[in-house]
């Protein structure tokens, strides 16, 4: 970070008097840049939005691809306005709830926020961090103005400074007091001893917890997934988060999740895990942001446990850009993958009372379907629909219709197979399901084939078993579909594995329908 205090000479020339009235004033200019890092990039962008909310003609704020620049003449005016904005953003970390013992309404800090909390005063949250102590914050900003240079170099921005701040989870969630747990670092030079931090980076890191532009979801009160968009360019990062906020699809005042079913409503979307959160978000973003300038396809996801030990896990998710195009195209045709397909899929398990929904396996399947779709893993996607553990995957009528459209846009288009050929695959799937009614071994054998020769062997076995069917059974299938499939595979032999996976999907669906009716 660099802070410049420049003397500006304002020259007012009076033509009639032919003289100059010279006034001197001081302009404070801050240039803030950091080493690219998923947390600190979002923190810098968050601070930019804080500054933009300040209604002061004296303040000029500029965001570039890699730095934030802001300047003003009146420091006291700027400081007071900034404090008010920080007080306003502070509310983003707090929700209102009831005390379980007394039933009295009180403030509750969102569980995943890694800021230490002091003793409540009259049901009001009191955070220990100095930035949120309204008596100490003015002094912090005074120190920032002074920018006392020193011989220490900040590990986050590379700037020289004098007074050190300790790098802790409240500032940078990837570190812990236990050195063995501090293994998630994107800055190669980050030392084990976390004291080389300047005041500006301390301020940015702490304030990032107030960012209302991040998605979060808590999984059964065990851990929270906090999604951090990743962009190389700060301007694009800001555009994406501004579009997200303007779409009205996030609700700040919720404790366990902030993705809304409908924009600006009060109903939180039903989510099943990390990847269903992301899929649901994309669907709502694309529906409600009609002409997006940017769409994030790379995310850093923090897994924050809700217990006392905060051993944070981190993963990067790269969403396939082609999938985002498929989702957009389906939305144009009024098909919603998450809302009408993923939410319409259930796992029914056989019990003494008949087939009932197994919610644990259903949740697992929904999450795996969302994940395999977003990372373009069709093989894993197909396996989710197979029968298992004495039960079957069933689809609602809407889910079934959307699956057909999804498979066409996601797979058939790239495979070079016309849409009408999907009927051949579905017909063969129906034959396999009919044969598998008594024994599902043929379906599992099909799923496990690893070579084209093994694939042909399974098709021959299907033909043999079909020859032994009764006339009534043959009326329920299309025997010529096998010959049509053989021709299709020979024409597209390089992608026979994808054809196998398509057969697995429709065989599993038809078998489930025949078993549960």
Image (tube, helix red, strand yellow):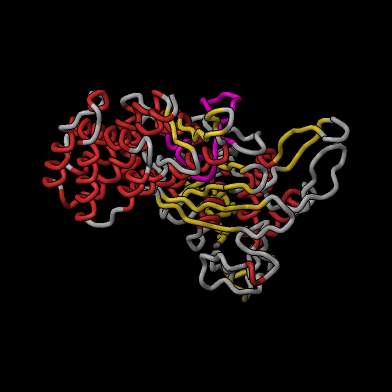
Q: Residue 265: percent from the left, percent from the top?
A: 57, 23
Range shown magenta = 258-286
Count of marks, rendered view? 0
217 or 233: nearer the viewer: 217
Q: Quadrant of residue 486?
A: top left
Seen in the image, is 108 located left or right of residue 209? right
Where does residue 480 sit, x and y in percent of width and height?
15, 32
Residue 514 visible, this orientation: yes
Q: Where in the figure is residue 317, as x and y percent of width and height?
A: 45, 52
Residue drawn at (39%, 45%) of the image:
383
Q: Is residue 370 or residue 443 the one in the foreground?
A: 443
Image quarter of residue 514: top left
Tell which of 136 and 228 is nearer to you. 228
State yes or no: residue 277 in magenta: yes
- Asked if residue 468 lies left or right of residue 55, the reply is left
* Image point (62%, 47%), residue name: 224
**Residue at left 62%, top 35%?**
252
Name the quarter where the C terminus is drawn.
top left
Residue 337 highlighted magenta (yes or no): no
Is the residue 223 above or below the residue 508 in the image?
below
The location of residue 416, given as percent across then percent down, is: 16, 41
Q: Nearer the viewer, residue 395 or 261?
A: 395
Looking at the rendered image, the quarter that the N terminus falls into is: bottom right
Question: Position of 346 compared to 253: left or right?
Answer: left
């Amino acid at each position: 970070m660099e802070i410049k205090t420049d003397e500006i000479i304002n020259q007012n020339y009076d033509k009639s008097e032919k003289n100059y009235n010279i006034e001197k004033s001081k302009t404070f200019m801050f240039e803030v840049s950091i080493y690219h890092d998923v947390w600190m990039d979002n923190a810098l962008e968050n601070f930019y939005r804080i500054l933009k909310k300040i209604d002061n003609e004296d303040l000029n704020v500029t965001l570039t691809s890699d730095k934030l620049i802001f300047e003003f003449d009146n420091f006291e005016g700027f400081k007071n306005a900034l404090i008010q904005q920080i007080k306003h953003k502070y509310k983003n970390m707090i929700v209102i709830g009831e005390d379980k013992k007394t039933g009295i309404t009180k403030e509750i800090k969102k569980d995943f926020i890694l800021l230490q909390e002091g003793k409540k005063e009259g049901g009001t949250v009191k955070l220990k961090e100095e930035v949120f102590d309204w008596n100490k914050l003015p002094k912090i900003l005074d120190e920032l103005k002074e920018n006392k240079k020193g011989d220490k170099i900040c590990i986050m921005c590379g700037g020289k400074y004098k007074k050190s701040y300790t790098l802790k989870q409240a500032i940078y969630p990837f570190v812990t007091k236990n050195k063995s747990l501090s293994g998630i670092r994107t800055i190669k030079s980050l030392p084990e001893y976390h004291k080389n931090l300047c005041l500006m980076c301390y301020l940015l890191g702490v304030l990032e917890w107030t960012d209302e532009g991040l998605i979060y979801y808590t999984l059964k009160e065990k851990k929270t997934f906090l999604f951090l968009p990743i962009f190389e360019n700060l301007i694009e990062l800001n555009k994406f988060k501004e579009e997200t906020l303007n779409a009205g699809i996030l609700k700040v005042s919720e404790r366990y999740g902030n993705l809304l079913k409908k924009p600006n409503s009060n109903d939180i979307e039903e989510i099943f895990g990390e990847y269903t959160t992301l899929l649901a978000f994309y669907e709502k973003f694309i529906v409600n942001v009609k002409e997006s300038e940017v769409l994030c396809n790379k995310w850093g996801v923090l897994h924050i446990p809700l217990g006392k030990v905060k051993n944070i896990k981190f993963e990067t998710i790269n969403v396939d850009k082609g999938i985002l195009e498929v989702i957009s195209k389906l939305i144009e045709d009024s098909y919603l993958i998450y809302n009408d397909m993923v939410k319409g899929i259930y796992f029914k398990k056989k019990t003494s009372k008949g087939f009932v929904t197994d919610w644990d396996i259903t949740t697992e399947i929904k999450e795996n379907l969302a994940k395999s779709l977003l990372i373009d893993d069709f093989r894993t996607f197909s396996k989710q629909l197979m029968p298992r553990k004495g039960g079957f995957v069933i689809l609602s009528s809407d889910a079934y219709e959307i699956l057909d459209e999804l498979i066409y846009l996601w797979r058939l288009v790239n495979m070079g197979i016309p849409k009408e050929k999907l009927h051949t695959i579905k017909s063969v799937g129906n034959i396999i399901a009919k044969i598998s009614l008594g024994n599902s071994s043929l379906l599992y054998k099909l799923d496990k084939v690893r070579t084209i020769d093994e694939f042909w062997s399974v098709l021959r076995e299907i033909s043999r078993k079909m020859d032994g069917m009764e006339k009534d059974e043959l009326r329920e299938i299309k025997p010529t579909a096998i010959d049509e499939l053989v021709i299709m595979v020979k024409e597209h032999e390089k992608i026979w594995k994808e054809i196998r996976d398509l057969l697995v999907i429709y065989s599993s669906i038809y078998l489930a329908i025949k078993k549960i009716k």
